[in-house]
Amino acid sequence: MIEAFGCHCVICGDPRIEAHHVRFRSQGGRGKWRNLAPLCHRCHQAVHRNRSLAERLMAMREDMFGKWYWADEYDLYENGIIKEPLKESFEDFMRREENEEMVRHCTGKEIGGW
């Protein structure tokens, strides 16, 4: 998560961060780095209290990584997307999804920011 998104809150920039599951664990979100966001305690609490803020963060992740950003290899396997629940198969699929999202973005779909 820190390697991909930095060591500051992605909303306010505070360096005191916690790992937030973008798609909540209670909704099936996994602990893979694409589903984690560095948030300070204040912003982390705000995302859990404010559904529209949480949905905005989820939409941004979907724009970046595709609709399976929250999943792991077992989710993709159980949904028939990959043939075996292997990390390599999972990463290959996710890289293809990310490339497709990048093409969509570069051809006119805007990715919102904070």
Image: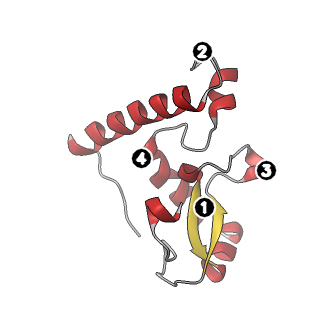
Looking at the picture, how far across and down is residue 106, in whole percent? Answer: 22, 44
Answer above or below: position of 39 versus 110.
below
Q: Label 1, label 4: how many angstroms apart (C-alpha)? A: 14 Å
Residue 15 shows in this picture: yes
Comparing 30 with 2, the one in front is 2
Gap in Å between the C-alphas at discs 4 and 2? 25 Å
Q: Earlier in the sequence, mark 4 or mark 2?
A: 4
Q: Which residue is farthest right?
A: 26
> Residue 51: x and y, percent?
65, 62
Residue 113 position in % (x across, y down): 37, 65
Q: How much space separates mark 1 and mark 3, taking CA atoms?
A: 13 Å
Q: Amino acid at mark 4?
A: Asp
Which residue in the structure is indicated by mark 3?
Answer: 26
Q: CA distance from mark 2 to mark 3?
A: 26 Å
- Considering the numbered disc 1 on the image, is that residue within a helix, a strand or a loop? helix
Q: How far from the left and from the top, in percent, is residue 107?
A: 20, 40
Q: Earlier in the sequence, mark 2 or mark 3?
A: 3
Q: Residue at x 63, y 31 (%)?
A: 73
Kindly identify which residue carries mark 4. Answer: 63
Q: Secondary structure at mark 4?
A: helix
Q: Residue at x 34, y 54 (%)?
A: 111
Disc number lying in front (2 or 1): 2
Residue 104 relative to residue 38: left or right: left
